[in-house]
Each structure stands twice: as structure tokens, then as C-alpha cells.
Amino acid sequence: MSETKNVERRWRAVARQRVALIAASLVIIGAASSAEARVPPGQDPFYQYSGSTPLADINPGTVLKTRTVPYHVLGFPLPIKTTQLLYRSTGQLGQPTVNVTSVIQPAFRIGPQKLISYQSVYDSLNPDDESSYAISGGLTLGGLIPDIETVLLAPFLLQGYSIVISDTEGQQADFLAGREYGMNVLNSLRATFNSPAVGLPGDTKVVLVGYSGGAIASEWAAELAPSYAPDVDRHIIGSSIGGVFVDPARNLRYINGSLVWAGLTPMALVGMSRAFNVDLTPYLNEHGKAVFEQLQKASILNVLAQYPGLTWASIAGPEYQTPEKIPAYVKMMNDLIMGTGGTPSAPMLIQEGTGGDLVGTSGNQPGFGAGDGVMIAGDVRTLARDYCSRGVKVQYGETPLLSHTPDALLAWIPETLLWVNARFANLTPPQNCGQIPAGNSLAPIPAL
């Protein structure tokens, strides 16, 4: 057996052991806290709009329902007040939707109200994995991620910050639909400011925070805010993002055949297809159709290291071995390139790792350069430089030899805590625009 096969077997064995341990933990925790268990979103009337006014006639950000729940970690309630709001939002294609956000209030606060808009990295194709369900006491495998993120949220709560966490992917779980992510975030902030139950002062300032999938939501919210939600934009004083998915088509080529991240390709295409209402199955072979079917409700925890070595060619039909031959694919990818929706009006902290070869993604590939295993540093540099040229104060940093998760994430967290505190302290935003090296082109991909 080749060394590659041995590595693949080891990755699969380790991944299966971890999933089994997590699943067993969930069973134990679920049994211990069954009294607190919530009805899944698909069965919970709170998530459904039942009003007589058509959604299209309701302004985005309008609060439709309100409830108060304790903040939960791994199903256990904590004495922290959380207000959940069902609100009118907007889908990727501009259609009216509803979504849920959770506003977490600190136990104590000194001085002016400060608000963090935190975007979770709960990457999933299953609506039951969304943040609001985990916060209200629900337990799922993919929903473990919002629970783990409490480690990042706790320092903000202890300093007296309020935190708003929207279900960024919407109620269909439209994974990686960046514009929809951004509009869900902005409308969640509108709802938060509109809610009497939350009671925020009108001059409350906001910082957007998110890593990986959360960076997609935070970045798109920042760039869309001036045009889509100027009423929210005036509250935003900064955005901190890390592990940034800038150019989807290039990212999916970068992870093609990766030992750990290759399964993200079909997962991404399932989510994008939902958001754009596109059927990609006619372009797949039988294996590809089977993989798409397997992933319909998968979370990122079901995908990592589970499809080692998977390539686009292995799931595509013989006449579509190059995905750019699919017009719908080209349109989706180009529509989701960051920086094409507008220019952020507030300062940004952007960080990216470059240790992708440590997690089974070939490093420094021609045309890509170094990345963290799933994100490409050259793309992130170009986005940062582009924003600098438009007048945005950007502090950009790369973390050599760190992969996407957990090491680059752990490096980003303390930087974010310091940077966010500085924004609320009205300190001069740092920027290193003149020192950011050139990166890759972010030009739209051509159809073939």
C-alpha cells in the first residue's frame, strides 16, 4: 500500500474516533439536560412567520416574534439573559425571508452600551445546527461549534459587552452564500436596535467579529452595509476577521484533492445551489450525485477528513471535468467574490494563516501561493490592498506555519480581543496598508 493510502487511512481512523467521542458526549449531555431540550427549529413555531401581511410588504429588520431564554452551553442553562428575535431578512436572490438572532446581555455593565455582532463558524447544511438552537438549549453534532465559541464570547461578556449572534446561513442553511450571510447579519442588527425587549440606546456602537464561516458573514456585512443598510452602517466602528474565504472558485481549486478539506467542495456546492436555486446534479456522475445526497444535512464536522483526496474530476460527469464549463457555476462563484458588493466604511483587522501543508493541502501551489489549508493568503492580501486603495484603514497580518484551525484561529482570538477593546476606547485604528505584499488577481472567472 502506498504512503498516500496509509496517510488517508490514518486520517479516516482519527476522524471517525473523534466523531464517535463527540457523539457519545452528546448522548450523555443530552440525557443529563433533557428537561432543557428544545424543539428543533424545523418543528418550532417560533421560527415560522404566520402573520397576515406578506413578507414582501414588511421592512427588512422588522421584529416578528420575541422570546427570552437562558443562554445555554452544551445544553446547560446559565443565568445569562438572552433575547431571541424572529425578524424579516433577505435571501441571496433578494427574496424576503425570516431569520432568528440571539442577543446576549452581560450580567453587569459599566459605562456606555457596547455591542459585538459575533458571526459563528457553525458551517453546516443542517438548519438544526444554527446558533439560536444551541443557545436556547438544543443539542446537535454540528451545534457543538456555537457551544465551543463560548470561550471567545466569555471575555466580552465579562467586560460588559452585549453580543448579538444571528443564524447567518438563514433558515435553509445556505452554506457559503456570502451576500445572504451579510444581509442576515445586517438585518439582525436592525432587529436588535428595533426591539423594545432588548432596549439598546440609539447611539450604541457595533464591532463585527468572525472567523472562517463567521468571517464570510462579517466581511459581507461590512462591505454591504453602506448601500444595503446605511442605518446600521452608522453604528459600525470596525470589523475583525480571520481565515477569509475571498474567492470561492480559487478556494475550491486550492483544496482539490486535499486530505482534510477536499470534502468542503461538494458541501460548498450544495449550499450555494440552495441559495441560488440551481440544480448541479445534471453535471455530476453517479458518485458525485451520491456524495451530494450524503451531504444534504451535513455539518463541517461530518466532512473534515472524511473525503481525503476527493477531486472535482472524481464527482463530475465526463463532459464537465472543468467546472467553468457550467454557466450556473461560473455565475455563483463570481457573485460571491468578496469586495464586489461595496466598500466597508469602518476599519478592519484581517488575519490569515499560511501553514496549509500541515493539514494535507499542498502548499505554495502555482497560481495560488501559500494558504492555511482552505483559505489562500494571496487572495486575502489582494482584498486588503483593494480596501486600502478605497480608503479603508486595514491592519493585515499573516501567521506563518499555522493552519486554518485550530492554530491560526487561536492566534486570531487574542489579537481580536485587543483590537475590539481599542475600537470601543476610541483609539486610533492601526493600519499597515503600505506594507501589505501583492497578492492574486480577484478578476471574475471566465465561462468556457
Image (cartoon, helix red, strand yellow):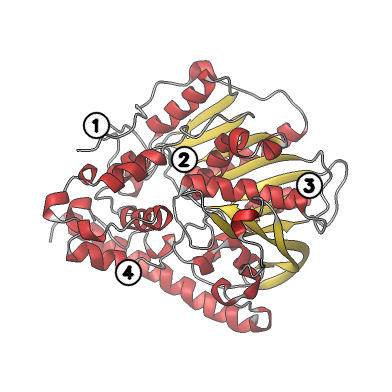
Indicate which disc, 1 or 4, sits on the residue closer to the N terminus. 4
Q: As rendered, which of 192 and 369 lies closer to the eye?
A: 192
- The amino acid type of the residue labelled 1 equals Pro
Q: Which residue is mark 1?
A: 366
- The amino acid type of the residue labelled 4 equals Gln
Q: Quadrant of the C terminus?
A: top left
- The amino acid type of the residue labelled 2 equals Val
Image coordinates of residue 80 in percent, x first then y, are: 77, 63
- As drawn, the label of residue 244 is 2
- The amino acid type of the residue labelled 3 equals Gln
Q: Is residue 205 above or below residue 10?
A: above
Horizontal relation, residue 382 to residue 91: left or right: left
- As drawn, the label of residue 294 is 4
Q: Is residue 95 above or below residue 397?
A: below
> What residue appears at the point 48 percent right and 46 percent down from the top-left corner?
178
The answer for how far apart the CA atoms under marks 4 and 2 are is 26 Å
> What residue appears at the point 31 percent right and 45 percent down from the top-left corner?
252
Image coordinates of residue 125 in percent, x first then y, are: 44, 62
Can residue 211 be seen in this snapshot? no
> What residue appears at the point 66 percent right and 54 percent down from the top-left corner?
58
Q: Which residue is mark 3?
A: 159
Q: Quadrant of the N terminus?
A: bottom left
Indicate which disc, 1 or 2, sits on the residue closer to the N terminus. 2
Q: As rendered, which of 198 and 64 lies closer to the eye?
A: 64
- As drawn, the label of residue 209 is none
The answer for how far apart the CA atoms under marks 2 and 3 are is 27 Å
